[in-house]
Image: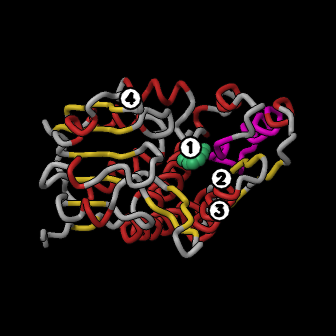
């Protein structure tokens, strides 16, 4: 029986440190600017997971001193109505960040809606201009979840230079920007996805394995190289045998903890880092708008 246990990458603890840093930066800036930073989170419909995420973001904003301008719309809200709300938030001087909580109801064109957000307020980093800046390694707003992964790896002094990083998942929210950030840090990057053949052969070769596919406990011990760093971006709500609902990741935590050197928990790993990066992006936009 294997006894080794991976070291935890404690995103919850580190995110609270970032909150403290942001809180004091905001307190200093606010006295000069005369207003706090502002974030508007737009939610359409009643997806319970989205509602929980939005509540989380609002609480985090409150804890650091960011003003919330959140709006909740019924699921039948039209594209043009949402578009005009975004345009008025683009013009609102009190608002530094705008985020459209995804997924939207299927009849709304989310890509077209994201294009309406002014790039300098796009704190989710999903506007094509910000994604283009990422590809070119230019400064710009970066997607929160992959930025959170990078900050957490940095906090634990995990070097990426020349390492083989495997990203499992190719979404625009996580997989694609994650791959670009790892490449920017000089990792050798492989992107695997639902059509990838011989997945285990690829994951087993990863020094850094990022799981972002949304398949509960897909990653088992035999898919992981000994001593690897495993980052679990999955947040899957399941109902266990006792009928209780809980969150689990894309990684089988107990198994993989016996093989990996470093591992993120779910919850308490990348989730809180995503929120911390959202706050950081909002403060960055605030600082830029103040200086411009
Ligand atoms: N839904 C789940 N995660 C996210 C996120 O990081 N940003 C947005 N906009 N929607 C999400």
Residue assigned mark 1? 123
Residue assigned mark 3? 52
Where does residue 292 sit, x and y in percent of width and height?
A: 56, 38
Q: CA separation, marks 1 and 2?
A: 9 Å
Give the secondary structure at mark 2.
strand
Give the secondary structure at mark 4.
loop
Tell me how the rendering is colored.
Answer: secondary structure
Residue 280 is one of the magenta-drawn residues: no
Closer to the camera, 113 or 290? 113
Q: Is residue 19 left or right of residue 81?
A: left
Where does residue 27 sit, x and y in percent of width and height?
A: 54, 68
Closer to the camera, 258 or 239? 239
Where does residue 48 sit, x and y in percent of width and height?
A: 69, 58
How many C-alpha atoms fall within 10 Å of the one at disc 1: few (<14), some, or many (≥20)? many
Q: Earlier in the sequence, mark 4 or mark 3?
A: 3
Q: CA separation, marks 1 and 3?
A: 19 Å
Q: Earlier in the sequence, mark 1 or mark 2?
A: 2
The N terminus lies in which quarter of the figure? bottom left
Residue assigned mark 2? 39
Residue drawn at the location 34% of the way across and 59% of the way down: 252
Q: Which segment did they paint magenta?
A: 83-103
Task: Check contact, mark 1 vs mark 2: CB within 8 A.
Answer: yes
Residue 138: which disc?
A: 4
How many C-alpha atoms fall within 10 Å of the one at disc 4: few (<14), some, or many (≥20)? few
Task: Check contact, mark 4 vs mark 3: CB within 8 A.
Answer: no
Mark 2, ligand 1, within 8 Å: the answer is: no
């Amino acid at each position: 029986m294997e006894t080794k246990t991976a070291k935890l990458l404690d995103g919850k603890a580190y995110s609270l440190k970032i909150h403290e840093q942001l809180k004091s930066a905001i307190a200093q800036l606010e006295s000069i600017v005369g207003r706090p930073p502002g974030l508007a989170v737009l939610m359409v419909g009643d997806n319970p997971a989205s509602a929980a995420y939005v509540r989380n973001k609002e609480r985090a904003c409150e804890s650091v001193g960011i003003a919330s301008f959140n709006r909740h719309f019924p699921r039948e809200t039209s594209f043009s109505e949402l578009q005009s709300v975004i345009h008025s938030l683009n013009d609102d001087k009190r608002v530094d960040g705008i985020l459209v909580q995804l997924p939207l109801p299927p009849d709304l064109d989310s890509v077209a809606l994201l294009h309406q957000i002014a790039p300098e307020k796009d704190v989710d980093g999903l506007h094509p201009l910000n994604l283009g800046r990422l590809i070119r390694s230019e400064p710009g707003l970066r997607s929160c979840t992959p930025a959170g992964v990078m900050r957490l790896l940095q906090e634990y002094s995990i070097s990426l230079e020349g390492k083989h990083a495997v990203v499992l998942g190719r979404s625009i929210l996580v997989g694609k920007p994650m791959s670009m950030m790892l490449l920017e840090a000089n990792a050798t990057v492989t992107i695997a996805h639902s059509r990838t053949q011989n997945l285990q052969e690829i994951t087993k070769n990863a020094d850094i394995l990022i799981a972002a596919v949304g398949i509960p406990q897909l990653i088992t011990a035999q898919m992981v190289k000994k001593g690897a760093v495993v980052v679990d971006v999955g947040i899957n709500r399941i109902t266990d045998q006792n009928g209780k609902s809980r969150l689990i990741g894309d990684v089988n935590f107990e198994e993989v903890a016996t093989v990996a050197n470093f591992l993120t928990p779910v919850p308490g790993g990348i989730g809180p880092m995503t929120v911390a990066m959202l706050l950081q992006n909002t403060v960055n936009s605030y600082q830029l708008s103040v200086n411009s």
